[in-house]
Structure formats: C-alpha cells, structure tokens
C-alpha cells in the first residue's frame, strides 16, 4: 500500500468522519455518536406569517413576544423581506424600516434574517445596481444580520451585486438555491452552483424548497453531495409542510449533515407554513443531537401565538385548509400558492371548468421556458401564460409583457434554453440581450432623491419609493400631512 501502515487516517465520506487503519483495513465511524448541533431559524415573523395569513401580522400583534423569541435559543429569526415590506406599506400602514428597527431594539441577542430576491430585491423585475447596493447597506444598518439571497432562475449573475454588498456591509451572506425538479436540475448542477456561490463569498448555503416538494431521499442525497463537494460550508434547509413531507425531509437532511433548519412555532406551523419548532427540537434531542432551543420560551410563545392564530381564524384571514396537508403539489409539481392563483384567475374568467387543461398546460409552458424554478416572479408568469394559452385556444397567441421580457433575457440565464421556435414567435424580429440585464439599467437612486425632495426624509424613504412608488408616495404624503397637523413639530427618526 502507498500509505504508511502504522498510523490511522481520518477520512470524510458523505459528511461523516471515519478513522481508517491501513494495517487492519478497519474503518471506524468516529463522529456518528457524538452530539452534533442542529440550529433553528424561527419563521413566525416572516414566512409562517406570509404563508398562512398573507403577511397580515401587524407589529403590535407580535411585539409582546419579541423578548421571548430573543431568549429561545434560535440561530436566527427570519423577520423581514419577502412580502413583509410590500404588505407593511400596502395594508398595515407601517413603515417597514421602522418595524425592523423596533424588532432589532427588542431582540439584541438573536440574528435577524431577511429574504432578498437578488437583483429583484423585493419586487418582480430587475433593479439597477445602485438601488440593490444601497438597499442592502441600509437593511444591515437598520438591524439585519443575515441576508438570504435567491434568484428565481438560479442565475448567479443576479446574486452577485447583492452578495458583494452584503459582505461589504458586514452581514452574513446566505447564497440560496431555489430548489426545483426537472430533467436539467441534477445534484451535480446544484453542487456547481454551491461552488460558484462560495467563490462569490457565501458564508452559508440555503436550499430553499419554496413549494415543499423535496422528499427525504432528495434531501439526504443533495445535502450529502454538497457536504462532500464543499466540506465545512454550513447548509440551511428551508421547506414547507404543504405536502406533509417536511418532518421526514428535515430528519434525513440532518442525518446527511445539514446544520440549520427553518421551523415555525407550533400554532403558526404546518400546512403551507414550516413544520413546528418544538416538535423538531423534541425529536432531534431524542436522537442525540444538540439543540439549543429553550423549551420554556417556546412554550410561552406557543401559548401566545395560539391566541393570534385564533383571532385570524375568526376574522377569516387564516383559512383552515392552509394548515392542512395537500399532496396536489406532488401530483402537479405546482407550488401551493401558484395553484390558488390559477384557481382565482380561472374563476375571474368564469372558466373554472378549464382547470384540468390549465394544470396540464403549466408544465408544458415551464418546459418551453427552459424549466425555471416556480417561485416569485416566474410562478406567476408561467401560471398566467398557461391559463392564457388554454383560454385563447392557441398557444402563445397572447403573451404578457413579463414573458416577453423573460424571452429577451431580462430575467437572466434560464436553466435550459428557451424553446427556440416559441422564442422566435414571441420576440419576432427583436434580438435577445447578451450578458447581464442590470448592466443596461441607468442609476435610479440619485434621480429619485431629487424628485422626492423633502417628502423623503432619509435614504430609507427613497428606497421604499423606488421599490413601491405608489404605495410609498401615499405613505409619505400621509405621514407629512399628519406631521403638519401636529402643533409641536417632531422630526421623524430614520
Ligand atoms: Co418559504
């Protein structure tokens, strides 16, 4: 043998450490029985809230629990980004920046995490780089510690600017894979992406299964493949309970070496939300894993959020079926949120009887478009196109401006090439763009600052306006009117 025989060797195979004695040919797994730590991200303030009650949880309704969450032993609390920003301005009359600062003040010990759509930031199309950079900088300044950055197409070019800005601001950059299944989405491809994200400076990797379609075997194989290829890189798995797979998926992911899992406090868990924090803490502890969750704190949280859940059940915001298991996603490979969009779209058109056709058309449109993962905004784009194709009686006779922009390459590189014939039919004489779309966009921050004048009191106001012009304008005008009515003028802190 080429190895000196008298000394033992440590080998790492699928995330497990083995001791190997060449003399005896004996392999011993040394780490298996040692307590390995599994950490938790609590999602009640963001994803659970977004998935169960359309993000309608106002600050006052979760404020009494912030200090308790802070003491509950979480790796992080996901509390910002995704739809929270939009809904704060649109429905809750809250300044999202102020919400973040208030959360930060009450939670000094726990890392605060946000979800960011890469070059789309919080919106549905690409923004110029100056906006992405300033947004990230200000998010960190206002209290964010971890930015989970994803792209609907998994095009790393769309993550680059946000990743660099996150690192520069001193926050943790969580490079994210939007998980999907298709003939072109292999573990090897995902491993390649992880390597690219590491090159870009990702501190952790998140596997984001937004539809809850990842099964236990896929979780085990994928986490093992990433751990083998990029040892030492912390991996966070994010899934939803929609299809009922989540507990099994997390368990197998933990066995394969996943470091962090996303869970929701029990009354706000299950169904379209994440699986329950307390249940996973209990089971993983029983299996010998080290879990930092403080049971007294989660008990207090559960007691409190039961009341919150019941209030939303009573007023109809929370529909009982959102909390139930629905395996339709596994049949159609269509995320739950997208399925309800399809239904409401057909209902509006008085064409609910065409649902089966629309469900059959959806995967065909997705294949034509080069198998994009179905996540905001591609899920809406593909769904609307499928319904249009069915109702028009002719495929791609009518296309949305978003699908046209997608075919021009404005959303980035697609996982597989777009069907050439269909692309030519949609674009006509127009040529698709080469390179990164955001490179063609002119800076937007400075002109917006000038335009807003004294309506904007700080950069945060300017950023809100760029993200949601109509909503932010209304919010800022109302704030101004309120202030002018107050006799003793007080300056709004930003
Ligand atoms: Co999610």
Image (cartoon, rainbow, N blue to C red):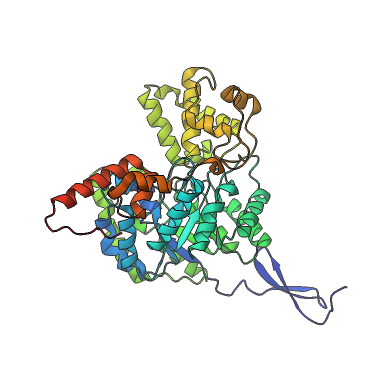
Q: Identify the image quadrant of the N terminus.
A: bottom right
Q: Position of residue 380 (x, y in %)?
A: 46, 35
Q: Residue at x 27, y 46 (%)?
A: 475
Q: Residue at x 49, y 56 (%)?
A: 148
Above or below, comparing residue 44 to residue 56 in the picture: below
Q: Going by the image, does 380 lie left or right of 317? A: right
Above or below, comparing residue 40 to residue 464 in the picture: below
Q: Quadrant of residue 62?
A: bottom left
Q: Identify the image quadrant of the C terminus.
A: bottom left
**342 or 427: nearer the viewer:** 427
Residue 305 in sight: yes
Q: Residue at x 43, y 31 (%)?
A: 342
Residue lying furthest top in this view?
393
Q: Going by the image, does 203 lie left or right of 191? A: left
Q: Quadrant of residue 143?
A: bottom left
Q: Going by the image, does 321 lie left or right of 286? A: left
Q: Position of residue 40 (x, y in %)?
A: 46, 64
Residue lying furthest right in this view?
1
Residue lying furthest bottom in this view?
6
Residue 54 in sight: no
């Amino acid at each position: 043998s080429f190895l000196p025989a008298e000394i033992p060797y440590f080998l790492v195979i699928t995330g497990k450490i083995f001791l190997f004695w060449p003399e005896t040919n004996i392999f011993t797994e040394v780490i298996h029985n040692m307590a390995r730590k599994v950490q938790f991200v609590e999602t009640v303030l963001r994803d659970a809230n977004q998935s169960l009650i359309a993000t309608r949880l106002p600050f006052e309704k979760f404020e009494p629990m912030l200090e308790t969450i802070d003491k509950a032993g979480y790796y992080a609390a996901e509390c910002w980004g995704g739809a929270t920003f939009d809904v704060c301005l649109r429905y809750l009359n809250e300044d999202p920046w102020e919400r973040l600062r208030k959360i930060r003040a009450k939670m000094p010990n726990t890392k605060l995490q946000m979800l960011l759509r890469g070059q789309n930031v919080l919106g549905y199309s690409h923004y110029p780089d100056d906006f992405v950079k300033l947004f990230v900088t200000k998010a960190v300044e206002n209290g964010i510690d971890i930015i989970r950055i994803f792209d609907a197409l998994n095009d790393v070019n769309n993550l680059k600017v946000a990743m660099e800005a996150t690192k520069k601001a001193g926050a943790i950059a969580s490079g994210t894979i939007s998980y999907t299944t298709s003939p072109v989405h292999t573990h090897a491809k995902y491993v390649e992406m992880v390597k690219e994200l590491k090159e870009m400076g990702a501190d952790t990797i998140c596997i984001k299964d937004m539809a809850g379609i990842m099964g236990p075997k896929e979780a085990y194989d994928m986490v093992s493949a990433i751990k083998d290829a990029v040892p030492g890189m912390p991996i966070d798995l994010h899934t939803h309970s929609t299809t009922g797979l989540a507990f099994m998926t997390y368990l197998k992911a933990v066995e394969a070496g996943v470091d962090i899992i996303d869970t929701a406090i029990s009354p706000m868990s299950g169904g379209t939300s994440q699986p329950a924090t307390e249940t996973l803490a209990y089971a993983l502890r029983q299996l010998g894993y080290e879990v930092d969750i403080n049971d007294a704190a989660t008990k207090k949280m559960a007691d409190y959020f039961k009341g919150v859940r019941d209030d939303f059940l009573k007023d109809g915001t929370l529909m009982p079926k959102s909390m139930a298991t629905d395996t339709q996603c596994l049949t159609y490979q269509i995320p739950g949120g997208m399925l309800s969009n399809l239904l409401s779209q057909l209902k509006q058109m008085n064409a609910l009887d065409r649902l089966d056709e629309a469900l059959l058309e959806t995967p065909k449109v997705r294949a034509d478009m080069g198998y994009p993962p179905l996540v905001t905004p591609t899920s809406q784009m593909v769904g609307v196109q499928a319904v249009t194709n069915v109702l028009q009686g002719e495929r791609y006779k009518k296309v949305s401006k978003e699908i046209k922009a997608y075919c021009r390459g404005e959303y980035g590189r697609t996982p597989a090439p777009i069907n050439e014939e269909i692309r030519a039919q949609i674009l006509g004489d127009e040529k698709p763009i080469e390179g990164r779309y955001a490179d063609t966009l002119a800076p937007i921050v400075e002109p917006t600052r000038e335009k807003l004048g004294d309506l904007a009191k700080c950069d945060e106001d300017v950023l809100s306006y760029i993200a949601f012009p109509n909503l932010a304008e209304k919010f800022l005008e109302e704030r101004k009117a309120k202030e002018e009515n107050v006799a003793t003028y007080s300056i709004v802190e930003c």
